[in-house]
Amino acid sequence: MSAQAENSVGTASSGAETSHHAPALEVDSLKTHFFTKAGIVKAVDGVSFSVAPGEILGLVGESGSGKSITGFSLMGLIDPPGRVVEGQMIFAGRDLAQLNDVEMRKIRGNRIAMIFQDPMMTLNPVLRVDTQMVEAVLAHQNVSRKTALEMARDALAQVGIPAPERRLTNYPHELSGGMRQRVAIAIAFINKPDLIIADEPTTALDVTIQAQILFEAQELCRKTRTAMIWITHDLAVVAALADRIAVMYAGRIVEMGGADDVIDRPAHPYTEGLIGSVPGHSQHGARLTQIPGMTPSLLNLPGGCAFRTRCKHADQACLAEPEATAHMTEATVSAPARMVRCFHPLGGGANVA
Amino acid sequence: MTAFLIRRLMQSIVVVFIMSIVVFFGVNVVGDPIDMLISPDATQAEIEATIRSFGLDRPVWEQYWHFLLGALNGNLGKSFIFGTPALPLILQRMPATMELAISALVLAVFVGIPLGLYSGLKPNAISSRTIMAGSILGFSLPTFWVGLMLIMIFAVMLGWLPSTGRGPTAEFLGIRSSLFTLEGLQHVFLPALNLALLKISLVIRLTRAGTREAMHQDYIKFARAKGLSPRRIIGLHLLKNIMIPVVTVLGLEFGSLIAFSVVTESIFAWPGMGKLLIDSIQQLDRPVIVAYLIIIVLFFVLINLLVDILYSILDPRVRLGGEQS
Amino acid sequence: MTSTLSDDVSDVQKLDGTVGDAAPAAAADSPFRRFVFEFVESPVATAALVVLALIIVLAAIAPLITPQNPYDLGQVDVLDSRLPPGEVSMSTGMTFWLGTDGAGRDLLSAILYGLRISLAVGVASGFLAMAIGSAIGLIAAYAGGRVETLIMRLVDLQLSFPAILIALMLVAVLGKGVDKIIIALVAVQWAYYARTVRGSALVERQKEYVEAARCLGLSHGRIVFRHILPNCLPPLIVVVTVQTAHAIALEATLSFLGVGLPQTEPSLGLLIANGFNYMLSGKYWISTFPGIALLLTIMSINLVGDQLRDILNPRLQR
């Protein structure tokens, strides 16, 4: 099926807006492979989606699904033996896949920013907070150090850190986990990027702090019209936060659509399995449904649909076709479009009708 | 922080004390210096007089007690061979050894760290494999043999540098040192290089290992995600992190440099403490041996203490004890 | 990032397909074969191993192959002294491939004999230190508590002083002689072994199989020797190689300084020392060749040890 058609599915608008603004980012058939001694690991194997300005896309999957690699591919941070082998990533009219390192450097931290999972390890432990924030500014803007410091202070205030001047002179280990992540978020927003990629930013935090940060992140995005890709394995997080959800499995997107749609009426068996295994969704005392088996090694994917080895609806059809086709619908006024990669979507395809 | 310092200080004093006992008894229990000092046909009276004058007729415990008392007063015994107090004998030659050790350290840092950094950043380049091979060579080369080769090549065959001895001294900021004269530098270069060779290899390997490990850390990836220039990432983020173990090791190795100077000084006839020690061992000049060892122990303890302090300055996690806000 | 192979046997059976989805099973190599394969991945290390083996063999059979026994005064003629390499003896007509030293001894033979002694002393002290040090380390790890603290303090104290100083001190006290040198070398090295073994043993002690063995009522000795010790071997092997190289170098240094092996057991260090005086007059070979022999030995041990360390290090990505 043409990737173009798949993509137009993604060009949905967020929330109440129905206008078709140009997407902030448009990814087309992205493939990132790792060429190791043991074989070729197809971490990302044909991923297409887009994100509109101010929209939050939740990228959901288990570990090994390729979601983080997708994020790194966008940033150009894939190191050998890995490489983006195919595909386009159109951002601000340019294909990120074609840019060299110098040009990418101008974009990183500036027009596209990234937030990592564990802020203890992502902030350099031997440098002060202000050093690390100011250098993010000075790398891209031609301002005085004093101005940069002020910007840093304002950014800290913006993410809800009290007494920002004092925090600036701290070292990372002097701050709590939630505080550190706020600093990381502040750094991400400081140059007013058009797109932010957040790679499991709240996984390492307490549940209570998680909720706070989720809310603040959402607010900031709406306010500044920054597009955001929120990568996570936690469906609960994404349900509350995202406008649209894309579910990844074994390097491909298996389902995509509006957040509510996907959660209330999942079309792909994997999505259903994910939802079923979230404690909140099951009845009190009822067994949690589990998806049998384990994620396959990306070195040796089962042929055909990658999920068939764990899927209770699988049959011969899932074997025969190496590339499953995607059913899709166009975006309507009231709801963003849906996409699913399955021969036997749940509800017989009615969910995606 | 001060509590930490005081505790370390107390520990250090205990160590010095124990070592002094070990050293003193070890050295004095064996060997008979009498035979060294007195001609075979001396009379019994002369022998006894000598024994008394050196206090060798007392029981060992008493000798040690006198020694300890003397030590606290700055008197570490009198040399059997020279007849003069041992401590000043050693202190006199200390500046020479210090010059050598410091020059070697400087060489190790300014040659070893850049090479190690380079080979850590590009681990598979041919040049960096060469550097690693070179470092194994530097490791395996016996210091004394290298010294000989250096003399042979640079002094005898090529005649570029003097082969032995220390150069003339000059004064600068109140310190007399041969490092301040050109000729002095020429004299110190070969022995310093010889001494430094092992350390350079060590520093290269350390820096390379540290660099390779640090490059995979998340904060480096984050720095890249911020769009920082490679120069800043390496020069600040990386360097500041790997400096900590490197500096620590270097500090501790400084003590070993002083110890190893024993060999280099013998080869290059460098008038330092090490040469004195070797001579003393061969001539069984016990007081000098004891005094030397005590001083070395003091040195080591001091260096350990300084390195601890330096470490806590460099690593903010240690220094500030991690207050949570 | 990549997850392990999935255990989807039942599902695969259900689907009854053979679309080659099972990964090629890892070749059922024994660990030893895998070890050998990984070792020879580095041509340098393999070459070093070959050189080392050669050196050991040559040194072992030295009396059989050397053209001359350099310590048999009957075979040595002082008129042959200080001949450059390649010269022919005036009395016996043999060729001195590497020249002669100050007393007329054939350098090639002297080097081989010297290698014997250097290797013997180095290896003997190494293994003795390993035995003693490992035993102490195991005791420390297994006993725990104050015994362990005391032992480790001792180890740390010793390790913070440079080897050469300790050796010099001991030699000053004990005097000359092969056995005394070995004692000094052992005293210098045991602490490394103790620390390494104790570290590994500590890790092992906490693992579950030790608990299991204890529950089965196995005696302490059995637990230590059959279970903990084998798992301490990898780092130990690396330390053995590095330390042996150090021991050989240290012995050579001591002999060079004149406080090592006595004249009757001339190691390479002594040979080099003998040649020191002739260097300034240009007779370089007397010191150079023994030094090269020493260098080759030490370097090949180090290279082998390096490769071993790389293979046995679980943290290095392969």
Image (tube, rainbow, N blue to C red):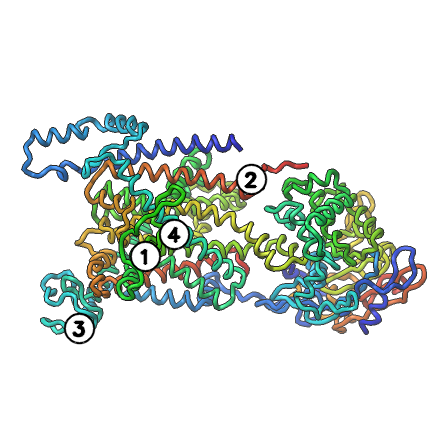
**Looking at the image, which residue sits at the far right?**
A333
In the picture of the structure, the residue carrying the numbered disc 2 is: B318
Residue C163 point in image, percent of width and height:
34, 47
**Disc 1 vs disc 2: Cβ atoms closer than 8 Å?**
no
Mark earlier in primary sequence (1, 2): 1
Q: In which quarter of the image is residue A2?
A: bottom right
Q: Which of B126 and C317 is in front in this view?
A: B126
Q: How crowded is mark 1: few (under 14 residues within 10 Å), some or many (20 or more)?
A: many
**Quadrant placement of the N terminus of chain C:** bottom right
Q: Is residue A46 left or right of residue B219?
A: right
Nearer the observer: mark 3 or 4; the answer is 4
Mark earlier in primary sequence (4, 2): 4
Q: In this view, does B127 lie to the left or right of C87?
A: right
Q: What residue type is labelled 2?
A: Val
| Chain that bears disc 3 | C
Residue A14 point in image, percent of width and height:
87, 57
Q: How crowded is mark 4: few (under 14 residues within 10 Å), some or many (20 or more)?
A: many
Give how far apart the Cα atoms at labels 1 and 2 are: 38 Å
As drawn, C60 above or below A150: below
Q: Are marks 4 and 1 on the same chain?
A: yes
Give how far apart the Cα atoms at labels 4 and 2 are: 30 Å
| Chain that bears disc 4 | B
Q: Which mark is residue C87?
A: 3
Q: Are marks 4 and 2 on the same chain?
A: yes
Q: Is residue B281 visible?
A: yes
Nearer the observer: mark 4 or 1; the answer is 4
In the picture of the structure, the residue carrying the numbered disc 4 is: B104
Give how far apart the Cα atoms at labels 4 and 1 are: 16 Å
Mark earlier in primary sequence (4, 1): 4
As drawn, A151 above or below B65: below
Q: Nearer the viewer, residue A100 or C50?
A: A100
